[in-house]
Image (cartoon, rainbow, N blue to C red):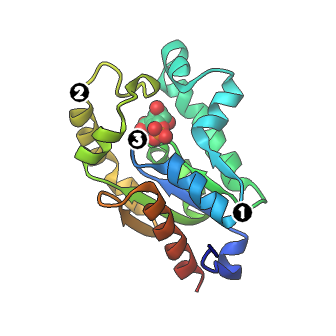
Amino acid sequence: MTPPSTGDAVAGRHVVLVGLMGAGKSTVGALVAARMARPFVDTDELVEVAAGKTVAEIFADAGEAAFRELERVAVDDACASPEPLVIACGGGAVLDPANRRAISGAGVVVWLRASVARLAERVADAATRPLLAGRQPVETLERLQLLRAESYEAVADVILDTDALDAGAVAERVLEEVAACAA
Ligand code: S3P
C-alpha cells in the first residue's frame, strides 16, 4: 500500500509519539516508521543501550532520578538526529521541561491517548515497567494520567483517541495526521 504523501514540510522532521505506558507507542511507532521508510527509535531502548541495563534494572540499581537523567540525554539525542525518525518517547519523558521543549520542536508530535481501562489491559507485562511493579495498575495509571495529561497536551500537535482502534489502525491514523500536518 502506498503511504499517504507526507510532503516536504514533514520530510525533514521527526514524528514523535507520546502517551502513557500501554498507549502502543512502540508498536505503532514501528509500523509508522516502516510505512515512512524511516528508522524507528524508542527512547527506552536508547537508555538501555547507554546504560547496558534494562529500564527495570536502572530503576532498581540507581533509582528513578538516574533513569530520568539518561532519558533526558536519549530524548535530546533522538530529537537532534539529522536523519528524520519516528520516535517513541517513554511515558514519563514529558514531565521534564527540557524534554518538552526538545519534543515540541522536533516535528509532528502525536499523543496516543487511551482510557485507563484500555491502558491497564495492555500493560500486563508489569515486570518491565518499574512504576507499575507491585502496584494496582488501574490506580497507578489513573494517577499518572491526571498528573501528565496537561504535559502530553502541551507538546501534542495531534491527539488520537485509540481505545477503539488496533495498532494497525492507529498507525494509519498517524500517517494521515502527519500528511495533514504537511499539507
Ligand atoms: C515510564 C514509562 C516507560 C519507561 C519507564 C518509565 C513512565 O516507558 O520509560 O518505565 O514514567 O511512564 P513506556 O511508556 O514506553 O512503557
**Residue annotated with mark 3:** 21
Regarding residue 97, the answer to whether it shows in the image is: no
| Residue positioned most to the right | 82
- Total number of numbered labels? 3
Sooner in the amino-acid sequence: mark 1 or mark 2: 1
Disc 1/disc 3 C-alpha distance (Å): 25 Å
Regarding residue 148, the answer to whether it shows in the image is: yes
CB of mark 3 near ligand 1 (< 8 Å): yes
Tag of residue 142: none
**Residue annotated with mark 1:** 37
Label 3 is placed on what type of residue?
A: Met
The vertical placement of 100 against 2, above or below, is above
Task: Assign a secondary structure to mark 1.
Answer: loop
Label 2 is placed on what type of residue?
A: Gln
Task: Assign a secondary structure to mark 3.
Answer: loop
CB of mark 1 near ligand 1 (< 8 Å): no
**Residue annotated with mark 2:** 136
Sooner in the amino-acid sequence: mark 1 or mark 3: 3
Res 54 → quadrant: top right
Residue depicted at 54% across the width and 70% down the height = 175
- The nearer-to-camera label among 1 and 3 is 1
Rendered location of residue 71, percent (x, y): 58, 37
Residue depicted at 65% across the width and 47% down the height = 41
| Residue positioned most to the bottom | 183
Rendered location of residue 7, percent (x, y): 67, 81
Task: Assign a secondary structure to mark 2.
Answer: loop
